[in-house]
Amino acid sequence: MRAGWRVFLLLLALLGGASPARALSPALQLQLAQGEGDARVAALNQALLAGDRRLGAYLQALLDGRVRIQGDQVRVAAPGEPPAAEGEEPMLNNRLRREFESALAALDLLAPEPERRAQALQVLADQPDPARLPLLERARAAETLPALQQRLDRLLAAARLSAPEPAQRQRAAQALAQAADPGTRAQLLERLAAETDPTVRRALQQAAQAVAERLAWGERAQLLFSGLSLGSILLLAALGLAITYGLMGVINMAHGELLMIGAYATWGVQQAFRAWLPPGAFDAYLLLALPASFLAAAAVGVLMERLVIRHLYGRPLESLLATWGLSLILMQTVRSLFGAQNVAVENPGVLSGGWALLPNFTLPWNRLAIIGLAALVLLGVALLLTRTRLGLLVRGVTQNRRMAACVGVDTARVDTLAFALGSGLAGLAGCALSQVGNVGPDLGQSTIVDAFMVVVLGGVGQLAGTVYAGLGLGVLAKLLEGWQGAVLAKIGLLLLLILVIQKRPQGLFAIKGRSVDA
């Protein structure tokens, strides 16, 4: 009987010890819950040296507001239960909250799950604390994954930058010289500002310079990719304009509004998927939005050509004014139907995030998708113009409208089909733009000038010229923006365009032949 009671009491003790918060000593609980901030941080660092996982439950209870102090007694409510009615809630300022959250992450360095350890390293990367060196060294000795070992080595070196021994600080600086992320460079520069030892200062300067040189390559790659991404958007926006302007000589000032229609068609398809289909099907809305944006913009383009533009061929000034009026009508129609505010177009899950090649060089999935779409559209248009009867007719009318009419080509029908094709391509550009920017009634106004610059610079009616001009202007615009800012970059591009037109009025890739019909 007495042995049975001993077993029962032992089980009670084990069950009582199962509560992590209660497993800590009352004195330590009280030190962490009250007193001055420095004293509580010192008690926290001392408790972390043991690396006791049971400390985490008490810290989480403090952060959740489940701890109450009554005299020298600390009462901790279980997760999901209300705190005790009696007692005073511990005061936590922003500094203490950061310290407690950082301590929780430090404890996760010893977690069995690699995902938790990786997340803890991500949290601690910007908070290297020399007081936690023993815990970091213990975590490094227990770590088995090479990728996490490298990150722990870097965190250990960053923490040793504030060590009291100059030799240890120097070795830490030399170790961090192999890094290639902006956070490490910021830590080196911050330590350099407070360093007094000349030898350590030289090591810090050399390490910061080495990291900066590595970061420069990532910045150059990011700048080049941003230029290619912008160039692909310009190419999509100008491709349809190159067809309509090159074929009919119509300065279509409503081309930007056709992009807007494609973007709103994408938004409409997204709303339909959200309202009528299960949530799991939402990521597939782009598969329907692409043809919907093409057909919506093409239909509006056919109406514009049939009702207005057809009667103004050969009259460039009147067609310019008429299409400008059409652009105002389309913008006001969209404002009346959908409101003047921007509408939200959400990226599918597969296009969220990016591919991190370097710490400061990430390829966003939506931008990569736009580059791929531009390449596919370009390939499709090239095949259409070179391998189909419609493309043959379009090229014939573009080169010599009168001769094409003399051999029996229905130029009016070709004009309609070509305008529908160009308008549909503008709708695809609007669908692409909806994934990277705001969608509103003024969307087309910000792209029409750039689209005309691409067409004029590349050469009217020249597909290859449009490609080179679009990608070239995109990369050049990003280079100038990084050097002089967005406004001066735009002015510089306009001046460059003027100089090119002065030397080559027909663009960089003018149509070659003995006769060109304007």
Image: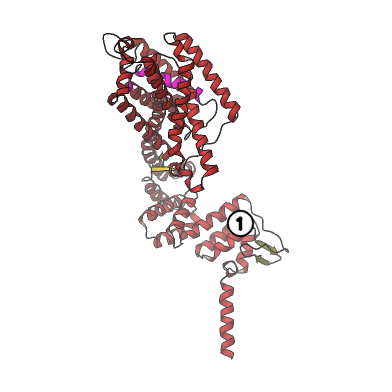
Q: Position of residue 51 (x, y in %)?
A: 49, 64
Q: Residues within 10 Å of mark 1 (few under 14, many from 20)?
A: some
Q: Position of residue 227 (x, y in %)?
A: 39, 29
Determine if residue 488 is in view. no
Judged from the image, the secondary structure of the residue bearing numbered disc 1 is: helix
Instruction: Quarter of the image for the C terminus: give it.
Output: top left
Q: Which residue is under mark 1?
A: 63
Along the viewing direction, whichever of 272 and 170 lies nearer the viewer: 272
Examine the structure image and report whether residue 111 is included in the region drawn in magenta. Answer: no
Q: Position of residue 409 (x, y in %)?
A: 32, 15
Determine if residue 299 is in view. yes
- Give the residue drawn at x 48%, y 24%: 300
Q: Amino acid at mark 1?
A: Leu
- Give the residue drawn at x 50%, y 60%: 107
Instruction: Quarter of the image for the N terminus: give it.
Output: bottom right
Along the viewing direction, whichever of 343 and 69 lies nearer the viewer: 343
Along the viewing direction, whichever of 290 and 156 lies nearer the viewer: 290
Color encoding of the figure: secondary structure
Decide if residue 405 is on the left or right side of residue 186. Answer: left
Vertical placement of 159 versus 237: above or below?
below
What range is drawn magenta here? 437-463
- Give the residue drawn at x 38%, y 45%: 179
Vertical placement of 331 versus 356: above or below?
above
- Give the residue drawn at x 62%, y 59%: 62
